[in-house]
Image (spheres, helix red, strand yellow):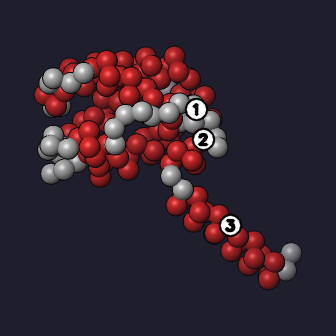
Amino acid sequence: MNMRKISQVLAGLSMLCALGAAMPVRAQVQADASLFHDLGGLPVIRQTVQDFVAAMLADPRIRHTFDGANLKRLEDKLVEQFCMLSGGGCAYTGDPMKEVHQGLKLTNADFNALVEDLQLAMDKNGISARTQNRLLALLAPMQRDTVTR
């Protein structure tokens, strides 16, 4: 392949990458459901979410943020969100993250505690570190919508 052709291929790849980065996460993820499969599908996602919520409620660092929360709805929306993000074909029907967390005055320490609790729940359910990191990478951008101080 000559240099001109290589340059054209690289330019095309760069444009595809830029388009992919500009697409909503949902559109990117739905094209590849391998993360959903690697998470164990809905049964493991549901159990992981149950363990995650239990861990958050037991965590003295953040359990107060769930006072008065509808825990059944919280679990249902987390399952929808994890399923959607991982390419499982679910639709997230909850409110936007910024709206849900408005007024909670969450800190980076609160967010980090939540992530630690999620990792514990995923460990408990046999989800590999590589798969955990793939899901966490999709959830990480939500920090800017949840941390307010």
Q: Secondary structure at mark 3?
A: helix
Q: Earlier in the sequence, mark 3 or mark 1?
A: 3
Horizontal and vertical percent position of residue 30: 60, 41
Identify residue type, mark 3.
Leu
What residue appears at the point 31 percent right and 18 percent down from the top-left corner? 72
Q: Which residue is mark 3?
A: 13
What residue appears at the point 36 percent right and 18 percent down from the top-left corner? 50
Q: From this viewpoint, is residue 4 visible?
A: yes
How many tags in the picture? 3
Q: Is residue 6 left or right of residue 106?
A: right
What residue appears at the point 51 percent right and 16 percent down from the top-left corner? 43
Q: From this viewpoint, is residue 35 visible?
A: no
For label 3, count other residues whose C-alpha is less than 10 Å away and answer few (under 14), some (14-19) or many (20+): few
Horizontal and vertical percent position of residue 59: 20, 25
Foreground pick, 67 / 110: 67
Q: Is residue 128 left or right of residue 49?
A: right
Task: State the CA–CA distance, disc 2 to disc 1.
Answer: 7 Å
Q: Which residue is mark 1?
A: 89
Label at residue 30: 2
Identify residue type, mark 2.
Gln
Q: Secondary structure at mark 1?
A: loop
Q: Is residue 61 left or right of residue 1?
A: left
Mark 2 in CB contact with mark 1 (< 8 angstroms): yes
Task: State the CA–CA distance, disc 3 to disc 1.
Answer: 27 Å
